[in-house]
Image: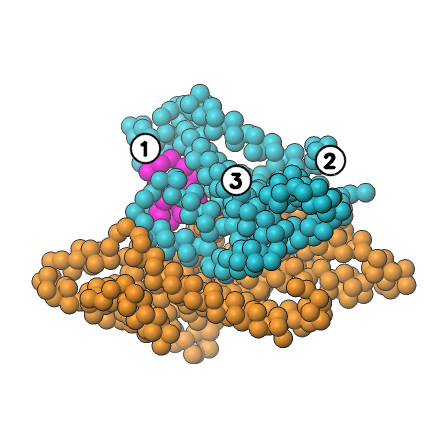
Chain colours: A cyan, B orange
Amino acid sequence: MKAFLHNRRAMAGASILAFFALVAIFAPLLSPDNPSDINYGLMLGPSSRHLLGTTPGGQDILSQLIYGARPTLVVGLLTGAIIAVIQLVMGVFSGYAGGAIDAVLSTITNVFLVLPGLPLLIVIKGYTSSDSLTTVVVVLSVTGWAWGARVLRSQAISLRDRPFTEAARMSGERRWRIVMAHIVPNMFGVLAANFFGAALYAVLTFAFLQFMGLANINEVAWGSMLYWAQNDSAQMLGQWVFLLLPGLCILLLGTAFGLLNFAVDEVADPRLRRN
Amino acid sequence: MRYILRRFLLLLLTGWVAITLNFAIPRLMPGNPIEAMAVRYGGKLAPSELSALAIELGLKSRQNEVAQYFTYLGHTLTGNLGYSLYSYPERVSTIIGESLPWTIFLVGASTILAFVIGTSLGAIAAWRRGKPLDSALVPTGVMLGATPAFWIATLALYFLAFRLNLFPVYGGSGINEGLVSFSGIGSIIDHAALPGITLTAISLGGYLLLMRNTTITVLSDDFVKFARAKGLRDRVVATHYAARNAILPNFTTFALALGFVVSGAIVIEYVFDYPGVGYELFTAVLNYDYPLMQGLFLIIVIGVLIANFLADLLYVLLDPRIRMGARS
């Protein structure tokens, strides 16, 4: 933990994430206007009334950016957490259990690994008519867990025959308990790294779905802002802030998750630690 | 041998799962292709004609679900993917055949470039660990991996192609140039340049970070220390000892990525109007063109499976430990 606090990359990532989290939580206080109001005049330039100007649809860009943090963060963190749990079951448990359980679970993992995620996602989204955030989170979780599960499985296998798990088995602890109390704490680093990796994947893919118009575009989020920017050709009309800033926010949030992912890895693996 | 056999069985199993999913998803999901079709042809066709067309397209059947499944399985295995709803009477297989070469060219070249550049930069960063170059490469790699592809592609298209006129604005080649002529090839490369550069840039970050970390891990291994102690030159140690071992995880990722070449780069192809598989898939979704969607999905899965199987075979050559059967 101390090593984590002293890691510059971890701190940079955590600061960016904390910043966006605060913005999302206090959005109603920070936001100058209602992000959905359309009665401010179209495509206004930056002014003291609208610091970043207004969209081609007449909404305040700054307010949209502030409120846009909310769904993006929710989808990122929630999907990250769900994926981490699926990976825990499919990877860690399968690796530890071995035998028939492992054979079945890792075959399922291998099947999901080669099913192309993005096309599958688009096909599923093409068939469902539901646009809710829940659908997005479910679809993202189902398509995004396989790679990490395979990594966790090999880690769990290497921990299976260590003396401390051996001892727990001897003392008659139940399998599920051994996994949760002995294996998982020992691979906390990899699990945490996977969580951040999954959150990064979710943020980018959610934005992508919205940009393509495959998720609810009437909800204010960075991805849907980009959809409207593209749809209204904002850059052609000179309002390129509308195209630039939401993407930059996604990039920054993604970088935060990426840095945390990298830093956790660095801290957890003694061979990567700086001497 | 047993390893290869197991991989091959997995290939068959996954292929079957994919075909079955392809059959099941449209039947499980709400929303109905026949309705979508009725909307399109509603004014022009009588209900009886519509019903006949639905049967012709395989959307409606008098068989029960089990029989339908086996009919579907048979058709798929014999390469009969049906007709596109949107561009009827064009066959799904024709559309796929036309878009596949574009995708393989653009995405294939970018994937290989990203692997080569990313891996080299990663190895260099590991050797210069903690030095300015490394400190710059790591966050760059993280940021490249966190860049929304569609966003950076839209920006690149607007500024570099539209504003500065450095690249063509859309398409796979000029309209009037023959594809086989010399100017045709030039035009194809010209059109692939900007999407290719964008795609390469956003995909190389992952290779860079993975190679850097694996190389650092390998560098602390005894055999590397020994090679250095022997007095071998750094360059030899770096390429023949460290990189040869560190590249294995990167190669796994690369093999997986090669498989996904067939799925195209949906984002990039969409933004640049590039006539590949990803573009077709997206159009199919927009037009509720279910047979085309299914056919494309199937082709993508087959591509991934074959590439993965070939990668597994190659892996046997690269890693003697697998060849000896030491890995379970």
Image coordinates for residue A154, horizontal then vertical, percent: 64, 54
Q: Which mark is residue A58?
A: 1
Subunit of mark 2?
A
Residue corresponding to mark 2: A3
The kind of residue on which mark 3 rests is Ala
Image coordinates for residue A178, horizontal then vertical, percent: 65, 42
> Residue B228 lies in magenta, yes or no?
no
Left or right of residue B112, residue A1 in this image: right
View extreme (top): residue: A29
Q: Closest to the observer: A62 or B162?
A: A62
Task: State which tag comes first along the sequence, 3 or 1.
Answer: 1
Q: Residue at x 57, y 73 (%)?
A: B5
Q: Closest to the observer: B183 or A117?
A: A117
- For label 3, the SS is helix
Label 2 environment density (alpha carbons within 10 Å; few <14, some 14–19, many ≥20): some
The kind of residue on which mark 2 rests is Ala
Q: Image quarter for residue A102?
A: bottom right
Image coordinates for residue A94, horizontal then vertical, percent: 58, 52
Label 3 environment density (alpha carbons within 10 Å; few <14, some 14–19, many ≥20): some
- Give, as a single range, the part of the protein colored magenta: A204-226
Residue corresponding to mark 3: A81
Q: Residue at x 58, y 33 (%)?
A: A16
